Structure formats: C-alpha cells, structure tokens
Image (cartoon, helix red, strand yellow):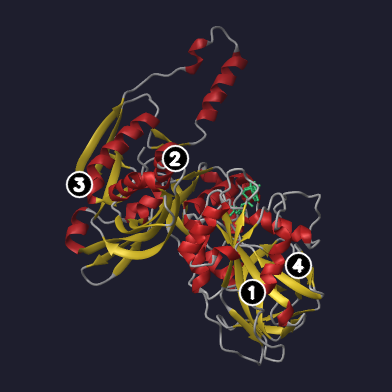
Amino acid sequence: YPPERIRNFSIIAHIDHGKSTLADRLLEQTGVISKTSKNKQVLDKLKVERERGITVKAQSASMFYEYKGMKYLMNLIDTPGHVDFNYEVSRSLAACQGTILLVDAAQGIQAQTVANFYLAFGEGLQVIPMLNKVDLPTAEPERAAQQIESTFEIDSSKILHISAKSGIGVDQVLPAVIENILPPEGSIDQPFKALLFDTWYDKYVGVVCLMAIKEGIIRRGDRIVSSHSKTKYEVTEVGIMYPDPKPTTSLQVGQVGYIICNMKSVSEAHVGDTFYKEKHPVDPLPGFVPAKSMVFAGVFPLDADEFSKLDESIQKLTLNDSSVSVHKETSAALGQGWRLGFLGTLHMDVFRQRLEEEYNANILITAPTVPYKIKYRDGTVKFIKTPADFPDGTTMQEYVESTMEPFVLATMIFPEEYLGQMLELCTTHRGEIQNHTFIDESRVMLTCRLPMSDIVTDFFDKLKSKSQGFASFDYEDAGYDDSQLVKMEVLLNGEPVDALAAVMHKSNVVTVGRDIAKRLKEVIRRQLFDIIIQTAANGKIVARETVKQLRKNVTAKCYGGDITRKMKLLNKQKEGKKRMKKFGKVELPQEAFLGILSSK
Ligand code: GTP
C-alpha cells in the first residue's frame, strides 16, 4: 500500500458519545471482527475498561476497505475519553492525519468535545464532525449541528448524521475519511524513521511498541536505534493490529503497526521517541511532554506480611502503565508502603481496582493529594508529595519563602439555568472565572481557573449534583501559583497520625479542621477506652471531639456453650475489622483515610 492508499485516523468524542461502538461497527463492516460478536467493544481491552465502559488505554486496529475500485488500508487509532487520559489523546493524534469528532446528537457539544477539538486542531489535523445516536427519540441533530458550527466554525451542512448502534449512515463514514483526510506523507526511499506512540507489555512476547512509520521501511532482523537513549535493538517481529497482533513481512512508510525488538521493560520505550536504522541516523520528530502525576496517594498493605507480594503486584501493574509513578514510603502509622502518583482520580481508582481484583491485594489507600511546591529562603525549591512532609511551625516561619499549589483551567458546559449555581460553585472553590459564552440560545460554556486540589476531592461530584448531571467538565494543567497553604494534623490521644495529615488553603483551616474531627468521630468505632480526636494547624488546636469508651462483648448474646455460634460471631467481628489499621491502640477504618479531604 503506497501512502496515497493509506489513511490514519482516530475518533475523538466526549465520554459515552459512542466512540467504541462506532469503532466496532467499522471493524465489522470491513470484516475484521464478525457481526455476531455484537457490541464487544474490541478496542477496550482492559477488564476495568469493559466494566466501567470507559477507554483507558488507546488501542489501534487496521482495516482493508475498497472504495471506488481502489483498495485502501485504514488505520484506526482509538483514544480514551476521560480527562485524566488527555495525554493519551495527544499521543494518539500524533500518529494520525485526521480525526472524526463524534458528537452525541441528543447531548450536543460537551466539555471534552471542545477540549479534544482543540487538541486535534492544534496538531493541524483535519477534523470531520459527525453526529451520532440520531436514532434516539431525544436526538436534536439540527441543534447539535448548530452548536458545532458556532463553536468550531465548521459548516453544519457538511456534518454526517449517523447511528453507530443501529447502523444508520455508518457506510458513509469510511468514504468521508478517505475523501477528507490527507494520506500520510513520506517516501519509502528515505531512511527509516518511526514515531513510537504507544507501548504495552505482553506476557509472552514482552514489550510491544506501536509505531507510526514516517519514512522508509522496516523488516524483521533490522537493527534500530532509539533517538532518546541511543540504545540499539534487533527487530524480531513486525505486524499490524487486526485487531490482535498479526505479523507481516514489513512495515512501510505511512503505516501504523507494532514492532517487537527485545526491549526488557516498558520503561525503555519512551512514548514520543523517534527510531531509526543503525548507521542511518535521522533528525528526531518532536516528542511529547511526558505524562505528569497530578494526584498522589499512599498505598499500604493491610497486613504488613503482604508487603513483598504487594510490591511485586505493583511492579507488574506498572509494567503496563508507565504513567503511574512509584516511590517507597514509610509511615509511622501505617508502616511500609508506597506513594503512587496518578494522572487523576479516575486513573487512581482504576489502578486500585486492578490491584484488588487482578492481584487480590488487601490495601489501605490514603486520601488523594496534589503535589505542592515549597520555595525556601535559600533559593531551593522542593515538591511535597506527602502531606506529612509539608513544613509547619518554626520551619515554616524561619525557612520558607513561599508555598505554591497547582492550578487547572477548567471548561464546563451546561444549560443556562444553572449559570448562577455554577458561578457560585467556582467561587466557593477559590475559582477565578475567565470567561463565559453561549454555544447556542440556551447552553453556556464557562472557563475558570481552579486549584487542582479541589478537583481531586469533591468539585466534580458537586458539579454533577448541582447541575443534576447536565454539566460536563474538562480541565487542563495551568501551572503553579503562590498560595497560602497550611498543614493540618490529626492527633489521636495526643499522637499525630502522619497518614491523616492534610495540606489546605489558610482560609479553609477552621471549617475543614472541625469537619475532619466530626467525621472521624463518626467513623471511629467505640473502643475500650476514650479516644480524643484533635485537629491542629500551625501548632494550634482547631477542633476536638471525643469517642466515648464502650465495652463491647459480641458473645454476650450467646448463652450456654454453643461454641460454633460464638466462633461465627467472632469471625464476623474479624471480618468487620478487615479494613482497619491499628494505630497505637486505636483502630482506624479505611473511611478515615479516604474521607478526610472531601467535604460532604
Ligand atoms: P468511552 O470509551 O468511555 O469514551 O465511551 P465511548 O464514547 O466509546 O462510548 P460507547 O461506544 O461505549 O457508547 C456509550 C453508550 O452509548 C453505549 O451504551 C452505547 O450502546 C450507546 N450508543 C453508542 N452509539 C449509539 C447510537 O448510535 N445510538 C444509541 N441509541 N446509542 C448508542
């Protein structure tokens, strides 16, 4: 297939607008998968992805398609739909020349539609808008088309109306891709040059690299070099995703396919790296900004004996997800564990779920926090990923010049009637409104600068409930800014529990301090002695609560010697303690570690 008969494209959409369903239909239409395996969402490969109906890791698949008597090779590069994984979207886009912007005809443009459009537009890609779900009785395709026209300056008469579910209009999708998206550039006679845009670890064959071939040709047995590390590799297999890996004799300019080349771990495969053939160096392609951890949480085994088993499980899981950062951490309260960095809270949830379900891990996970930045008087700058490490008291007064926290630029889209509430929500979260515009007569797009820490706790939940689910939301990194931050400590019977420490803005100290103490009182079970809960900031006690002692005897109800019943009850009590961590004599449930930062 010469480049003019190849099309590399992706589908971008807001979550649930039907991207995976459309991908399945296209793969069926071209015979890559059979029609009988209905709705199997071939591209969503992880179990959690299928369960949650979200795409986390981008996949790709090749199709052969005949159009006007010519045979074409169509490479579909899937993209994730959740804001946490936006960096995956940009890397997928770098492998394409164009993209389908899929919009749910009933919901219209949503926050991620806008974010994704600008990502693609910024990459210089051809964007083909399509309206999906036109079969729904609630679909309003004209209105959605109008929104697309006014927001993206795209002629609404050119928009395809389809239903990925019922199949309406789907046969026009690939012709539109061929007609509107440019073929890849490059020549087979140039020295080999390829962009590595995705990678994963396969149990049997090791590291698999997904590459877009920008120039030349590659075959099994060739020796290639990474521009990033200058490491040399021997190619042991090349092929296309169809939809599973299928070996081919070569990969040529314009194609998208996989290369296996004896890499030991995915950490050697730098997404955005350029590969060339040994003795034929090339200028590297512009790489990507590496994925940044925005959310950190402590992970500890419930049973200290499981530390090494858990260590192994975490290593295995991160083999396939290099965007998780891992550091060992020791907590006075929780013992040995890790501080893991994630792209966002959904990413964290997915990781936790996989750890528990695929590796049977019994873990305790602390409240998520963002990385703070401290500027010391002597000019040094330090990132704080664990709240317990945040300076306070005299250190703060004597050595710290300023404290900074990360901000994001948030985009929200919602019906006009919620404008007042949305503005209020932003202001109560220390937001700075940047702009609000109407995308049609009754829908508003609001942009606002917000502290990332509020995003990782409860901003999103509040947005959903205050707008009755009608508001959509997306954000991008907006850098660090000075902020008056304070560390809040939690003391149980006078002893600070490092794993419960939190960092917050000065203005929140009193409300949050009282709230934390109250909430802890609710989740800590009565024990055989009084428990005094205190919260303190800068050496001053902010709030105090007491959990009164109780003599709890679960076996009191059993008279006589019914030992089996007694054992049953005792076991039940043991079960209840499963998610508890003993601190001194005080037992803390998982909720104590998770519930701290979010306000109800
Ligand atoms: P992410 O992978 O999370 O980004 O979601 P997605 O955009 O891939 O959405 P998906 O294909 O999973 O579809 C979401 C839901 O919409 C599913 O329940 C689909 O069955 C449904 N759906 C998709 N296309 C159509 C359509 O054309 N009509 C109707 N009625 N439902 C559709």
Q: Quadrant of the N terminus?
A: bottom right
**Up-down: is 381 above or below 49?**
below
Q: Nearer the viewer, mark 4 or mark 2?
A: 2
Which residue is nearer to you in this view: 449 or 162? 162
Where does residue 52 sit, x and y in percent of width and height? 60, 46
> Dot 1 corresponds to which residue?
181
Distance from Cα at disc 4 to Cα at disc 2: 41 Å
Label 4 residue SS: strand
Is there any visible trace of residue 45 in the rendered image? no
> Dot 2 corresponds to which residue?
468
Mark 2: amino acid: Gln
Is there any visible trace of residue 395 in the rendered image? yes
* Residue closest to the far top: 560
Few, some or many residues within 10 Å of mark 3 (<14, 14–19, 20+): few
How many numbered dots are placed on residues in this image?
A: 4
**Up-down: is 414 above or below 242?**
above
**Circles 3, 4 touching at the beta carbon (< 8 Å):** no
Where does residue 408 sit, x and y in percent of width and height? 37, 60
Q: Quadrant of residue 530?
A: top left
Mark 1: amino acid: Ile
Where does residue 145 sit, x and y in percent of width and height? 54, 58
Distance from Cα at disc 4 to Cα at disc 1: 16 Å
Q: Nearer the viewer, mark 4 or mark 1?
A: 1
> Dot 4 corresponds to which residue?
63
> Dot 3 corresponds to which residue?
539
